[in-house]
Image: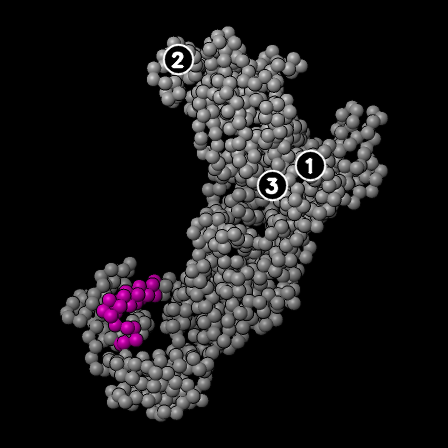
Amino acid sequence: MLDFKKQEPEILDFWEQDQTFQKSLQQKAPQGDYLFYDGPPFATGLPHYGHLVASIMKDVVPRFWTMRGYRVERRWGWDCHGLPIENIVEKELGFKNKKDIVKLGVAKFNEICRSKVLEFADAWVGTIRRLGRWVDMEHSYRTMDPEFMESVWWVFKQLWDRELIYKDYRSMHICPRCETTLSQSEVAEGYRDIKDLSLVAKFELVEEPGTFFLAWTTTPWTLIGNVALAVGADLDYVKIICGQQKYILAKALWENYARELGDDPEILAEFKGRTLVGKKYKPLFDYYAADAKLANRKNGWQIYNADFVSTEEGTGIVHIAPAFGEDDMRLGREKSLPFVQHVNMDGTIRAEASDFAELNVKPKDDVQSTDILIIKYLANKGLLFAKEKYEHSYPHCWRCDTPLLNYATTSWFVAVTKIKDKLLSTAEKIDWTPEHIKDGRFGKWLEGARDWSISRQRFWASVIPIWQCDKCEQLRVFGSVAELSQASGQEINDLHKNVVDEITIPCHCGATMHRIPDVLDTWFDSGSMPYAQAHYPFENKDSFDNKFPARFIAEGTDQTRAWFYYLHVIAGAIKDSPAYQNVIVNGIVLAEDGKKMSKKLSNYPEPDIVMEKYGADALRLYLLSSPVMLAENLSFVEKDLSTVFRRFTVILQNVLNFYLMFGDKKLPTLPETLNNHLDKWIIAKYFLLWREVTQAMEDYNLPKATRPLIDFVDALSTWYVRRSRDRFKSEDQADKEQAASTLAYVLVEFSKVIAPFAPLSAEIIYQQFAGVNTSVHLQSWPQYQESMVDEKVLNQMNVIRDIAERGHALRAKAGIKLRQPLATLQITLQGINLENEYKDILKEEVNVESIELVENLTATDGWVVDESGYVMAKIAIDTNINEELKDKGVVREIIRQINSLRKEAGLQPSDSPTETYQTHSTYLKKVISKYKAEIVSNTSAGDFIESGQFTHCKEAKIEAEEIILGIQS
């Protein structure tokens, strides 16, 4: 007996020895090439369900299009650069900050990073193989390889030549621990709720002592860098007296501070914000304000109008610190404000702010600590008006979890806004699954796209290939190793920072050019992947140009603002084209309780254990048929996986095992003429399935393609095989052969349809007919045959299946088992003619002696009636059981018990041992004597005798009478 789950490893070994995957790439591809991009994972940890979901998608689609006549190359890649690797190495070395790396030496640090990159590669190879995925991992690309990095340089040079690269000084998010800027998508990935402090500070007017502007801030640590206040020119403000002091704030907001203002505040004046513009106030801190050398000092510590001021929250007066915010920086440039940067890149306060020197402004372990000290300082100075604890969403480093800072620094940018219209236009050519991502998550992100900060102040990454003269500051950009070798006169084998930083170039002015210190954002590697994995344009140029763009890519929802986005930006910039045409976006797999999967909490079963227990195909189908394939989240419920295993794997293997007991092991052909309605029906069902799956796959809708497969297995087993079972043992040789041929044909063709989804089960089935040295994955996708879809048969069978289901329900309602024959099933039909063959099928299914088509149902004692159902039919069943019906029910139960014993004894249908019984019941003896021939026929017995000698036996109670059934072998 075949056991699909246990045979899966054998199929994996066969593929490996046969090199079936390689053969699928080498065979003729009449449709040409189908380009697929595989986003590279980091091999710094074991693969989890998120990786498996993506891998399954990336296996199903290429397998399908391969069978449709395309050549679909699938090359694995490894993401090697960036903070994920650096943070692991820093942790292992016990490093606390970037200075520790510099002290060790960049060369040593990078070599350690290189050694850690593929630490878990073998585990990945094993898991991906066990999943049944076909992908070339032997010739994988790595983002740290010189060829890959050279193509990244080429991409950068293409952007440079198109004047899309520029340098600017602006406020952006940095990680103070990693001491580097982060991209917009990296920032978006790290938001989480924290408890923080806000305050309202008092800024005293120079011209009116005792009168204070009130300004609210959620970042008290930035107040040291305050150089201005902003108001809205057209907003209404009030001056309020409270005790000996007067306060100015927005009219719409003053009542929010009723508690702080006391019992009887008095409004002294109302005025527009424009009347406040130009007024001077005293700095909260004098660390920088007293510095006569501070540029633009005369413009500082006064009121300015700004369009971003509102009365939604706060006080309607905004504190301005140009070093720590985009709006602040813009206003600072516009008004030539002094620039105070009191915080180092590592997040510590500089020495000039002597009362707070070396404090971390937002420490990871206590985000409020420095703010508390600043609040206490202001309170002691009488400059604190109000303070409040609040919880809000705050960005953290996506790798080390350190709170980020909005911080002014220098960075190199890709001018995305310059080509935004083109990107929006080319995005219209991309089809998304699910469709709402196109104009939703991806489209809105694209509409709001900002220029991309691509420089990082780190070490293990592709470098920015810009050299700058020490004297005249001329810049020179290199797009290839050959260009740099020629300019420097040096042979270059490694393009990492520790190597290329040592390469100098003579400048035309006579001085020396050095490479700028920054490296590239790792997403620049990822966005350059299509070109770099092919070493384009240095190799494979014609082949690449002929195939580009990719027909298909797939990743999780987080990549809509990351990999998908950066691929699109670079392709739009240098190719005037989208990078891909079709995208499937998956959601997140959560633990059963809806929480994030956690090794620490052990709240999920390990993938390898799950595949050992249920098989890879069951796991694939469970995930493929779930909402996770439509960008929705899925709580992983092992019970649901078990259901898929039972409904698909177990039932399908049972169908195949049933066939193999009676049918020939050869590739079948569809009989030219089908005489049996069951055969016509299952063939029609198969072609309807083909049509549904094919259309869904062409639409890249994996759940829509997968769910019908499980339903078809159910229909094949519980209706076709069960209703055809006796035909396989029939003395009518022609009908027997037609049943066998039909089932064989359906199994073989079905193996082709499930091949992309359940590749291991498909191979097991196909090889039973075609031989163990062949593969279903080298076959073409089946062809549709419209002529085999008999709509009349489908409709009639739908009617009787509905009636049968309702008949079962009536029996259950009456408490009568299906094995107990009943006399009559009555049916009223409206507009439907039920042929005799369908009546015979229905009679066997509901286990009644006769079917009566009537105009009015009998409603006397012993009858149960059902007038529901989606077809125009009403039914009633006679539940009165006479002696003859009772006897037949007993016979059915004896047959069931004997067949169960035969199965326990490991007998095959062809085995015909003598079967025995022992009982003191005269009633059971009488029934056995009367129906002995039927019992023998339905249990494949050589004989059925009364005897106490047996090798296998079981005790049973039938109609309250005890009996021992046995087998002599």
Q: Residue at x 66, y 31 (%)?
A: 412
**Label 1 or label 3, whichever comes before in sequence order:** 1
**Residue 330 appears in view:** no
Q: Considering the numbered disc 3 on the image, is that residue within a helix, a strand or a loop?
A: helix
| Left or right of residue 638: residue 88 | right
Q: Nearer the viewer, mark 1 or mark 3?
A: 1
Judging depth in this view, the residue of 153 and 906 nearest the camera is: 906
Between marks 1 and 3, how big is the CA–CA gap?
Answer: 33 Å
Q: For residue 567, which numbered disc appears in the image? A: 3
Looking at the image, is mark 2 or mark 1 earlier in the sequence?
1
Q: Residues within 10 Å of mark 2 (few under 14, many from 20)?
A: few
Marks 2, 1: nearer the viewer: 2
Please state which amino acid type lies under the numbered disc 2: Gly
**Would residue 455 be seen by someone viewing this image from the given angle?**
yes
Q: Do callouts 2 and 1 mark residues in contact (Cβ within 8 Å)?
A: no
The span picked out in magenta is: 795-821
Amino acid type for the residue under numbered disc 1: Lys
Outermost residue, top direction? 207
Residue at point 42% right, 24% down? 312
Q: Where residue 174 sits: x, y (%)?
A: 60, 33
Q: Secondary structure at mark 2?
A: loop
Residue hosting label 2? 243
Main secondary-structure element of the magenta-colored stretch: helix
Q: Which of the numbered marks, if any, corresponds to residue 653?
A: none
Q: What's under tag 3, amino acid-wise?
A: Leu
